[in-house]
Amino acid sequence: MPPRPFQQVDVFVSGPLTGNPVAVVFDADDLGDDQMRTFAQWTNLSETTFVCTPQDPAADYFLRIFTPGGELPFAGHPTLGSAHAWLAAGGVPKGEKVVQECGVGLVNIRRDGEALAFAAPPLIRSGEVDASDLDVVRAALDLRPSDVIAASWVDNGPGWIGLLLASGQQVLDIEPDFAALGDRMVGLIGPYLGDTGPDDHPDYEVRGFAPGIGVPEDPVTGSLNAGLACWLRAQKIAPATYVAAQGAALGRAGRVLVSDDNTDIWVGGRSVTVIAGEVDL
């Protein structure tokens, strides 16, 4: 097989090397599942994507998304990073927005100045978390019942459980027991009040744990932030527009921009191509 165009894109950046990288492989129609899975394991990134010919005529491309542990129907930072790479490689959308086809269907991506943003897909599971699951999650995160302000399923494909804590600093202080979490995918969010938090004053701190798919802690997570936004906006807890910080616990400084236009919730941020070339699979 000939070498294929390749980019590695840093997503949700606030500066150089501050976001979450995604590996993007183009011209992937003839790659098999095992080849995709093996390369995703080799990159050892949170996600690796493969850009294919769309099946839906409304889509600009079809995207397959792999973690080191397997394939996902949807993920946020790979969506934005792959759209950035596709545009940088000369891709021209059929309409005003880039339309990605993936496991959850069609996802719209719009340009917001220097940033790209995707329309949050609807939750496929929401509402109350079973008491038994919540007990396991709290124990794995060393949280008392009173530490959790609210909890909900915020599953838009990967299977996230969301927990709202009292503050961003409390989110940062968590030291998870990944073995105890098992296959559960858990996201935390806590507000920054007043002058607390980083110097650029984000509104929330977020962390995402997914040890069951080979990503103990994800640096910056688009799908989780989208699910959290759908939950917190529906409960009128979060404002229509806010900025979430994520990645500080891993030495990153990701920034996720959330806005609700009363039709869609848009989740976006800046992306930068760090590596461009070819990959021989």
Image: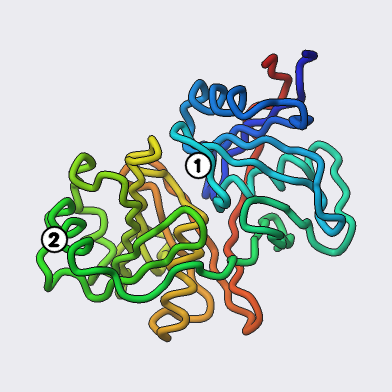
| Quadrant assignment, res 59 | bottom right
Q: How many marks?
A: 2
- 88 above or below 35? below
Q: Is residue 30 left or right of residue 124?
A: right
Residue marked by disc 2: 143
| Camera-side mark, 1 or 2 | 2
Mark 1–mark 2 contact, CB under 8 Å?
Answer: no
Residue 6 position, x and y percent, is 71, 27
- Where does the C terminus fall, quadrant-wise? top right
The secondary structure type at the circle numbered 1 is: strand
Viewer-side residue, 270 vs 64: 64
Res 266 quadrant in image: bottom right
In the rendered view, tell whether residue 233 sits above or below residue 2: below
- Residue placed most toward the observer, 182 or 227: 182
Residue at 58% across, 77% down: 260
Q: Which one is in front, 254 or 81?
A: 81
Q: Is residue 58 left or right of residue 246?
A: right
Give the structural element (helix, strand or loop) at label 2: loop
The one of 164 and 256 positioned closer to us in this rendering: 164
Residue 275 place in picture, x, y as percent = 65, 27
- The numbered dot on residue 43 is none
Q: Which amino acid, by three-letter code, is at mark 2? A: Leu
Measured Cα–Cα span from mark 1 to mark 2? 27 Å
Q: Position of residue 231 (x, y in %)?
A: 43, 75
Can you say which quadrant of the picture contains the N terminus? top right
Quick one: label 1 or label 2, which is nearer the N terminus?
Answer: 1
Say whether residue 201 is left or right of residue 37. Answer: left
Mark linked to residue 20: 1
Q: Residue at x 67, y 51 (%)?
A: 102
Q: Amino acid under label 1?
A: Asn
Residue visible at 26% across and 59% down in the picture: 171
Give left or right: position of 35 versus 160. right
